[in-house]
Image: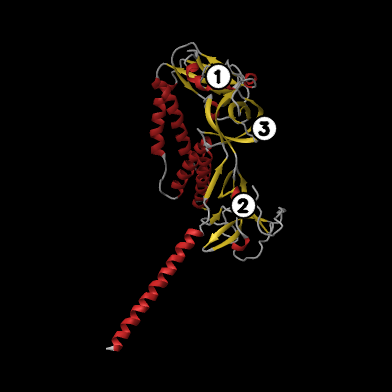
Amino acid sequence: MRSGLFNKITARVLVLLITVLFVIIIGGQIYRYMNDRHDTMEAALCTINEDIAFEGVIIRDEREIDYGGEGVISYTYPDGSKVSKGDTVAKIFSSTEEAFAEKRLNKVTDEIDMLEKAQSPGTINYVSPESISRKIDDHYKQLIVCSNSGDYEGFAEQKQNISLVLNIYNILSGISANYDERIAILNKDADYLRAQADRVKDSIKASETGYFVSFCDGYESRLTTEKAMTLTQSEIEEIINGADAVKQGVSENAVGKMFDDYTCYIVGVIDEDPRVAEEASLRLMLDSSDKVYDVTVVSVKKADEEGKSVVVLSCDSLDEYICTQRVQSMQLLFDEYSGIMVPSTAIRFRGGQKGVYVILGENITFKKIDEIYNGDGFVISRNTAQEDHLLLYDQILLEVVNEQDVQQQPEPEPDDADTDEVSSDGGESEKDS
């Protein structure tokens, strides 16, 4: 009886002791959480792209080409092509069907030439399937390069080259005996199209040597390279906002224009930026194309609006994208930085090394940063896997750290180029980047 009573008392005491111990542990954790919280920020990835977007006005010394007759116009050169004096830049037909027939005829005759070349003994007797296979791979790679770079003229050429070598490969491998039947059909089509395409009523010839574009927008006589140097912000904005209205006033007889030089001026209004200075070499991309153009800053002057600049850029490239629209959305391209964003107020110095303090579990430790970009109130540190550097998702301490709270660790090795001063106590000193 006494033994049973003793066991009950012992069990109750043990339960009580365990309960008290549990309360002490939980209470300690709550007390520590309430009294030992730190102001932190999780290290996250950040990408800074410093491109400058603006609306640009493209200006050249241009002259209209007029034609007073009637009919359907079929242009013989792509926009931006160089032509000589006397070259036919357009043909005039009585109907759309006749004009289309000429375009179709060119494609049909090109296909005939390709098929005849593919089955010519002079071609197939001196190549092997292996060499043709390598050529197919080479042309395919070039096709990808042209596509990625926005070189659509080169893309069309490589596409034609692939078609040719594929046709040759089919002959060599026995997939096709010849293309005689296909060529016979195409020749009949060509005869029919040629009969319509030969019905040219008139033609328009270049009166001078230069570069040809098949449209006018009404600014040909209003905007010159000399005028580009004096345009104000209000005048530029008027051109940007009024381009469509001006185009409605283009002469009915205007069928195209000519200009002497492939160089053009690009004028726009941007936020003031020290990187855009006279004679600076920059890169520019149009929103309508993936191609990157090299440009030179000719002039920078203050705009009407505070904090804005009127810039004049010179571009020596010419293609259909930069010559077919007067006003275009574009960007000046600068470097892109990607890494971990660090507030400037969190940066400390330890042992001559710039870094931050982070919380690892219950410990506070110093980690180095590798600065790749210095922004307004923050820096970007290179994203690395080195344990002694700031890592993604680390908890960055934003508050001043007492030396006694820091986990004991050796002084970090300073970078070779680091000559920053540290505080006299060997701990940390705050410094804005």
Q: Where is residue 297 in the image (x, y as percent from the top left)?
A: 65, 30
Q: What residue type is labelled 1?
A: Lys
Residue beneath label 3, please?
277
Answer yes or no: is residue 144 visible: yes
Q: Quadrant of residue 98?
A: top left
What's the residue at 65%, 56% (across, down)? 428
Label 2 or label 3, whichever comes before in sequence order: 3
Can you tell which of label 1 and label 3 is closer to the viewer?
A: 3
Element class at badge 1: strand
> In this image, 22 relative to 90: left or right?
left
Q: Quadrant of the N terminus?
A: bottom left
Are the residues flagged by discs 2 and 3 in contact, CB closer than 8 Å?
A: no
Q: Distance between the residues labelled 2 and 1?
A: 60 Å
The reply to whether residue 79 is visible in this rendering is no
| Above or below for 205 versus 360 | above
Q: Where is residue 14 in the image (x, y as percent from the top left)?
A: 37, 78
Disc on res. 257:
1
Give residue 347's mark. 2
